[in-house]
Amino acid sequence: MTDLISFYKKNEKSIALAIGILICILLFIINPFALENKAKIVLSIAGLMISWWILDAMPLAAVALIPIVLFPLFNINSVKNVTGYYADSMIFLFMGGFFLALAIEKWNLHKRIALNIIRLMGTNGDRIILGFIISTGFLGLWLSNTATTMMMFPIAMSVISVMNENPPPGSNMKNFSLVLMLCIAYASNFGLGTIISTPPNVAYVAYVHEKFGYTIGFSNWMLCFMPLTIVLMACLYFVTVKWLYPNHVKKSEASNQYIREEILKLGCTSVAEKRVLIIFFITVLLWIFKDVINQMQHSFQLDDIMIAIAGGLLLFMIPSGKHIDGNPPHLLEWKDTQRMAWGILILFGGGIALAKELENAKLMEQLGHYIASFSTSNVFIMILVITTISVFLSEIMSNLAQVIVMAPVVTSVAIFLKIDPLILGIPMALGASAASMLPMGTPPNAIVFASGHIHLRDMIKTGFVLNIISIIVITVFCYFLQPHIINLGK
């Protein structure tokens, strides 16, 4: 048995690749749904990609490139049409968000924001954690959840170190450390109030745009789901701090001193930080008030994607005010984009390509009808079921790949039931970001688990409670509020 486990660990990737190929071949040979040849090939390729995504046989973005090779090879679609999916307009919305995130990180603006929020909240145990939840949640609205966690992680580790050097009498530092780490990950995951906050949000919005030609407005999304984010953050605080893991850490001068020292190290707000902040606020304000501006005049029409890219371009145009070798660099230089998650953009394109061909082959329609045959006409129950499946499925599967696979399915179910597809699709996308039980659920979960302050049983216990809360909150918001703000009729 030990030898078998050792062999698997040494050959894990090769075994995963072989399993994916085997699934692909079996789907083609067995043809379980009695499909026509073209549909059978598309299903086999989908089985290959999905299994490799789930088993992590290759990098997600590398798997996403498979349609460019296999779809033209088997005459499913032309290279020109398939590669066109990788330049879908919605991908550029995320690219603009990446540019803003890079500039914020480059000039340490994220650290200044986080430290000052913590300073304002106070430094007893509960307030420190609340400060981290607020600052992490705020950053997570505009940056990727992974980048947000990576930014907050070293600050939190430093605070834990300082607190452990001189723990207040009667305090439970184990609970404090555990909760601080968990809250960084969960607050990053729960920042669902903007389209660009998590990859699943962007992926689903891109799918809706491709499928229905409908663009979900940035301001409408914020209006609907910013309150949801606030509710989830409040639940996160009360569940972890007040219920499961009270820390009894009183106000600490050592923590106060550490925060003050870190802020002093940053110095005065630099010209570059101010300029990035101005561009950031202009971009956000244009996203929020885009519809109002469009209604007030007809000379031009603003679009969320235009605004995102315009904000990104300004970063490359405006000098930072800091001279290096006699020349003032711009707020962003192209070399800075080496740190950008280009793979995510490719993954979006691959997901769109796969979803489109699954639909062209009528596979999603058939699957949707099959699932719908077991469905209920009660919309609330359907939202609850879809959200529950999405939340728990994302514990073991890449949430981005999950949305790419599930979006066409839930759309087909909604169409079969004659309800607005967004009623089921949006809670599916939101649920995919709420995985809280396992380290592999989301990258933030994995990052904080590696800190050594979290036992798996604690993450499972806390995550299960938060999963149930997330399911209930998302279902309620998507049933009662979402249809009045975001629907295909608007």
Image (cartoon, rainbow, N blue to C red):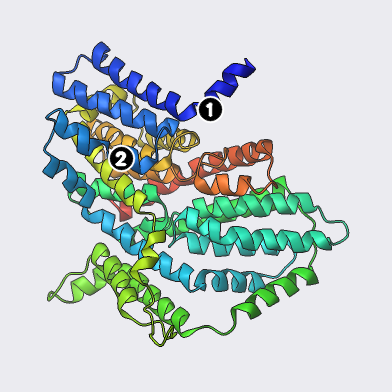
Judge whether residue 377 can be spotted in this image: no
Mark 2: which amino acid?
Answer: Ala
Looking at the rendered image, the disc whose residue lies closer to the viewer, 2 or 1, is 1
Question: In this orientation, which residue lies closer to the viewer: 73 or 285?
Answer: 73
- Establish if 254 lies above or below 26: below
The residue beneath circle 2 is 64
The residue beneath circle 1 is 10
Q: Position of residue 147 (x, y in %)?
A: 48, 57
Mark 1: which amino acid?
Answer: Lys
Local secondary structure at mark 1 = helix
Question: In this orientation, which residue lies closer to the viewer: 488 or 356?
Answer: 356
Give the residue drawn at x 62%, y 46%.
450
Give the left or right position of residue 268, taking residue 126 as reference.
Answer: left
Give the left or right position of residue 296, taking residue 26 as reference.
Answer: left
Q: Position of residue 45 (x, y in %)?
A: 26, 27
Quadrant the N terminus occupies: top right
Judge whether residue 290 can be spotted in this image: yes
- Mark found first going from the N terminus, 2 or 1: 1
